[in-house]
Amino acid sequence: MPNEELIQKILKLKKERDAIILAHNYQIGEIQDIADYTGDSLGLSIEASKVTESVILFCGVNFMAETAAITCPDKTVLVPDENAGCPMANMITARQLKEMKKKHPGAKVVCYVNTTAAIKAESDICCTSANAVKVVGSIPKDTPIIFVPDQSLGDYVSKQCGREMILWRGFCPTHHRILAQDIVNARKEHPDADVIVHPECTADVIELADQALSTSGMRKYSAETSARELIVGTEIGLLHSLRKDNPGKVFYPASELADCPNMKLNSLEKILWSLEDMVYEVSVPEDIRVKAWEAIEKMLKLS
Ligand code: CIZ
Ligand code: SF4
């Protein structure tokens, strides 16, 4: 089916189903273009909680749709492909976190939003890459902190806050494909460009950058900087909105290899099928949802 026909069908069915489409910044451009909102996982969940439609079709990976289901329990949350998981989120289980808590009694658990609902339910407070420094800074200095699951973000935040944390050794395989040498090469090729990277990148990459920012931070920075060229060290899906929003600026990916296969599982066809069959519904057991919401709500109160 040609794209235009597909898009018209999706838009018509979306109305009939009383649905909105939310797309993460890392989705393919075609999906971002038909979405009602694009943004980071937290921004999208906050957006979801404000809308009046009864169905949310979440285009991203599973933990993001779960976060929407935790935040908006009265809505039906659908994903176009139930296999779109996040390897980083799957690098820690609730049992492993419980064991770690036993080893460090008295420690507070800060979990990155890239976690399953079960991990959020076992955590004291959630954070995103946009607010991690603020969240960690809100915990009294003498309280030990367990930070899960991203070691790179944890290490970055630890340096920013000047405090040690107990880090879980998870990582994002996509962001770790960006190498320090890629930044060195890109700077040589584009000496006037600003370099912005995601804090999920390795420490040596972050050290070579001008700024380490979340995807929402990168969108804001790109709009505001006087630089005409930017080297972007994150999942390459973000380049779509950066280029669309800033037609006068040039964006170079730090590495074309930073392409998350899970984020790319969704397609326009799958979105149509999802609305046709009302699949795949994401739900979180109520006891876990309530506890996970407490960790998310604590974070929201800080913002
Ligand atoms: O929180 C998100 O959406 C992720 C995974 C990345 C970011 O920085 O926006
Ligand atoms: Fe997970 Fe990394 Fe893919 Fe984001 S880019 S969904 S953190 S694997």
Image: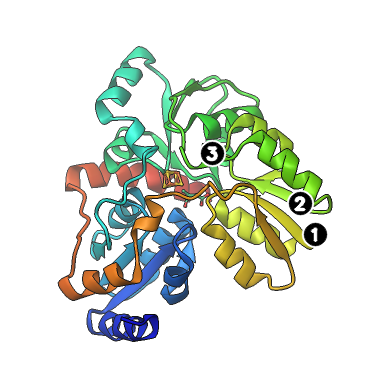
Q: In this view, does 10 lie above or below 130?
A: below
Q: Which of 165 and 182 is in front in this view?
A: 182
Q: Is residue 36 above or below residue 183?
A: below
Name which residue type carries label 3: Arg
**Colouring of the image:** rainbow
Task: Find numbered disc 1 in the image and state the secondary structure of the residue it sits on.
Answer: loop
Kindly identify which residue carries mark 3: 177
Q: In this view, does 78 lie to the left or right of 172?
A: left
Q: Which of 84 and 55 is in front in this view?
A: 84
Question: Which mark is drawn over residue 194?
Answer: 2
What x and y, as percent, mark residue 166? 48, 20
Mark 1 and mark 2 in contact (Cβ < 8 Å)? Answer: yes
Mark 3 and mark 1 in contact (Cβ < 8 Å)? Answer: no
Q: Nearer the viewer, residue 159 or 251?
A: 251
What x and y, as percent, mark residue 30? 44, 71
Say which label, 2 or 3, has the lower sequence index: 3
Question: Which mark is drawn over residue 227?
Answer: 1
**CA gap, disc 2 to disc 1?**
6 Å
Task: Find numbered disc 3 in the image and state the secondary structure of the residue it sits on.
Answer: helix
